[in-house]
Amino acid sequence: MAEPRISSIDGKLAKEFAVPSHVEEEKEKMAAFATHHVAAGRRVVLITSGGTKVPLESRTVRFLDNFSSGRRGASSAEYFIDAGYAVIFLHRHRSLYPYAHTFSTINMLDALQFRSGEAASGHSGEVVVDQKVLPNVVKMLKRYQEVKESQLILPVEFNTLSEYLHLLKAAAQALSTIGSKAMFYLAAAVSDFYIPASEMPEHKIQSSNGPLQLSLNMVPKILSPLVKDWAPQAFVISFKLETDPAILLEKARRALDTYRHQVVVANILDSRRGYVVVVTPSSQAELILTEEDVQNGVDIEERIVSNLTSAHNNFISPDGS
Ligand code: PMT
């Protein structure tokens, strides 16, 4: 039997990025989740979501971060579940979460009222929710509870870049057993730069030493071993974010040529909530929300997920069988 391929990125991961202590446990949970749902006739999507934190000191006081809120991943998870998928939600700790994300800008205490009860009855009172402050809260809560009870979502958290990289590798290996029924939807905004543990100061960097100059190494492009080695039969979607529209599509096409995966969803920072381009080796589809869509509360993620679930069908059964 052929030995499994060991990519050079595997060696780099093991050497330069601390392995989280719970990675094997999470891998077993993800493998069991995937096997269970595929046996029940579902497909499984692994969604990555949120930004990554890159520490500057090993006893971390400071770190580099990025803008990603995790809304794309959280909202997409809901549409994938509606489309019949089971979701492994690999997200940054405290980034936006499915069903809760619509309330992220609201101070919960403004939505709650306390009504005191009868002291004589031993009932001290109750907390009631103002549904004008939290519109749709009942609908969202019911759906969240249904999804949780049916175990259609498996949340897995990361915080640092190292945790993200090792957990994504574990997820890819866990899903390799379900072949083309696995989809990878890599919406996380992952840092391209980091400081290797061997070059990181242990203690807080002292401002008394004067201006700080940082030298950062390149983070290995994990898409490469994911597609080639860890989950070679899966349907893989990466995202491409730029701020300059002039280079967006060329960068998306270059990613497809380099990594040989199935789809790149290209977006621009300022317009990402209303416009994306779904790029494949043979096609390019613009998905746009109109003013009317926005007024009707349509999310761009609904369109993205609809496009990708059809493409996944074709990937699994190209002859339509
Ligand atoms: O979270 P929101 O605020 O809703 O914003 C959503 C988003 C803009 C973050 C999302 O739509 C998006 O575009 N995510 C990808 C951001 C990006 O620019 O990725 P990239 O070009 O650095 O990386 C390309 C792809 O490889 C991405 O799918 C990334 O998840 C993946 N990657 C990147 C680096 C790395 N070391 N490993 C990776 O797997």
Image (cartoon, rainbow, N blue to C red):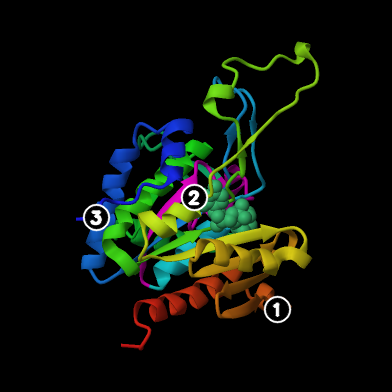
Determine the quadrant in which ligand 1 lies: bottom right
Asked if the residue at tag 2 contacts the one at tag 3, i.e. Cβ–Cβ closer than 8 Å, the answer is no
Q: Quadrant of residue 44?
A: bottom left
Residue annotated with mark 2:
222
Sequence-wise first label, 2 or 1: 2
Helix, strand or loop at label 1? It is loop
Q: Position of residue 294 (x, y in %)?
A: 67, 73
Query: Cβ of disc 2 within 8 Å of ligand 1?
Result: yes
Against 212, residue 238 (above or below) is below
Residue furthest top as drawn: 208
Residue annotated with mark 1:
290
Residue furthest front as drawn: 2
Camera-nearest residue between 257 and 275 = 257
Residue annotated with mark 3:
2
Q: Position of residue 263 (x, y in %)?
A: 52, 69
Amino acid of disc 3: Ala
Whether the magenta-drawn stretch holds residue 93 is answered as yes
Quarter of the image where the C terminus is located: bottom left
Amino acid of disc 2: Ile
Question: Is 226 on the left-hand or right-hand side of 201?
Answer: left
Sequence-wise first label, 1 or 3: 3
Camera-nearest residue between 102 and 213 = 213
Camera-nearest residue between 237 and 282 = 282
Q: Is residue 66 visible?
A: yes
Pointer 3 local density, CA inside 10 Å: few below 14, some 14–19, many at least 20:
few
Q: Which residues are magenta?
A: 84-112
Whether the magenta-drawn stretch holds residue 250 is answered as no
Question: Is 44 on the left-hand or right-hand side of 41?
Answer: right
Sequence-wise first label, 3 or 2: 3
Give the mark toward the camera: 1 or 3: 3
